[in-house]
Image: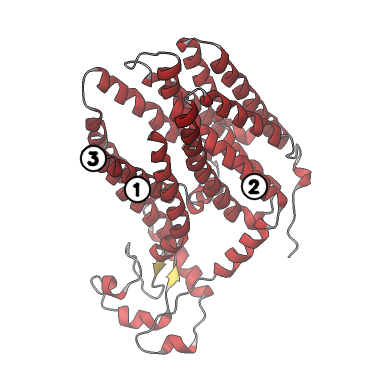
Amino acid sequence: TCSLLFTGSTVGSVVGTILLERIVNFLGQFYPSLDQHSYLPAVPFFDRLFTKDVSAALPCGVGYSPTKARFSSLVLGGLLHPLFFIVMGTARNYPALLLAYVIAAFARSFWTCEHFNFYVVSTPKKPLGVLLGCWCIGSFSAPLVCQTLMAEGILWKHFYLGSLVISAIALSLTIFSFRPTRNEFLTDRKAALDAMQITPSAHSPGTDTIIQPFHEEKVRALLLALSMPYQWAFSLFAFIYGGSETTFQGFIVTYLLTNRGSSPDTVGYVSSGFWGGMAASRILWGYYCTGLTFTQRKHIIHACTGVSFFMTILIWFVNSTIENALSSAVVGLMYGPIFPGTLGLCNNVLPRDVHMVSMAILTAVASVGSAVLPFMTGIISNKDGMRVFCYVTVSQTVAMFVLWLFFPSSPRVRVSSSA
């Protein structure tokens, strides 16, 4: 039945991927003719609560603010994710748990969207690896705290309800860090006014003209990206990696309990070891990857997949909980650089005008892989037992290692658009 929870993650990821673009575009709408900033979407009902000049702004149309869209989507994700903790902490039946996983996956889609990832890699220090590493620190701490509480006899539901405090802190930090400044508003306002084209229908009373100057460019970039073989190759690799990461950390504890006879009071710490290794390597990657060449980054990721394969072989054949726990930590350490490194290499290979769309595709495909492949693993394990865990993880690491052989070792193979 645990595998069905990944079905909930699949549904949430798919729904989030489908609706994300529409929701972000809606949240980023604003009236460029108004000399003031509003955190609410450009809906006349909302704006009449704060200004008397909305009627004068309507004929000039509605613009799009990337800064406002990024802030609003992050806040929306921060408001939705606590619902996961509330439902998990108060659930009385299995369907409620399934609903909680749907909500969690849907909320995460707002934090891992292409707008946010592209913003991070466009900053001077490009701290995507550090950002993903901090994400792993939370994943490291959660099972550590939960296992400790359960060892003390505290119900696991209390862990989720207590996590609401962390959600409140995260939401507060998000608002403080990403709230649009006055200069950002003026920059977006100027860009919207420069791109705005007044149509005859825009002067009709009570009508709005929504200006989305980059919509056609996004469609062209999407079609261009989908026509590139390397985009499909990187997407396949991201799909396998996303599924492998979630399969390993999602089933390693169950595997040790059923096949190694590990203690229920301590086996949860193995998951923390996996995430701790991933957090360390991703933070180090974020700090030092900018000083590495394309070829060095490519070979490092290839080595990471090779070492991961060796560790999964040890977990398969060495009947020792301690060794399996150490191997799990090493797998996490090796998995850390793979995803941010793949995003960076993909940007180096593909032309600049598809970078944002390409990152969106890779992130979405990795999310789908992290939901579909663990679900398939769970279905197989329900029939053949948890011994299939080793077969699956070894196969996934081999697939990544072999597929990575076909990627270029030099940026000279960069694909250029034929515009």
Give the mark, 3 or 1, whose residue is nearer the N terminus: 3
Q: Residue at x 55, y 42 (%)?
A: 126
Find residue 1 and report its horizontal and vertical position in percent.
37, 35
Give the mark, 2 or 1, whose residue is nearer the N terminus: 1
Q: Amino acid at mark 2?
A: Asn
Q: Amino acid at mark 3?
A: Ala
Q: Residue at x 61, y 37 (%)?
A: 341
Q: Residue at x 47, y 16 (%)?
A: 325
Going by the image, does 229 lie left or right of 240?
A: right
Location of residue 32 by image quarter: bottom left
Residue 168 appears in the figure: no
Mark 3 residue element: loop
Query: Which residue carries the number 2 mark?
Result: 347
Q: Which residue is at the front of the view, 401 or 135? A: 401
Query: Which residue carries the number 1 mark?
Result: 103
Find residue 285 and report its horizontal and vertical position in percent.
56, 31
Q: Where residue 91 is drawn, which disc sits there?
A: 3
Q: Are marks 2 and 1 in contact (CB under 8 Å)?
A: no
Mark 1 residue element: helix
Location of residue 143 by image quarter: top left
Q: CA distance from mark 2 to mark 1?
A: 31 Å
Q: Is residue 273 above or below residue 344?
A: above
Q: Amino acid at mark 1?
A: Ile
Q: CA distance from mark 3 to mark 2?
A: 43 Å
Q: Which residue is at the front of the view, 169 or 138? A: 138
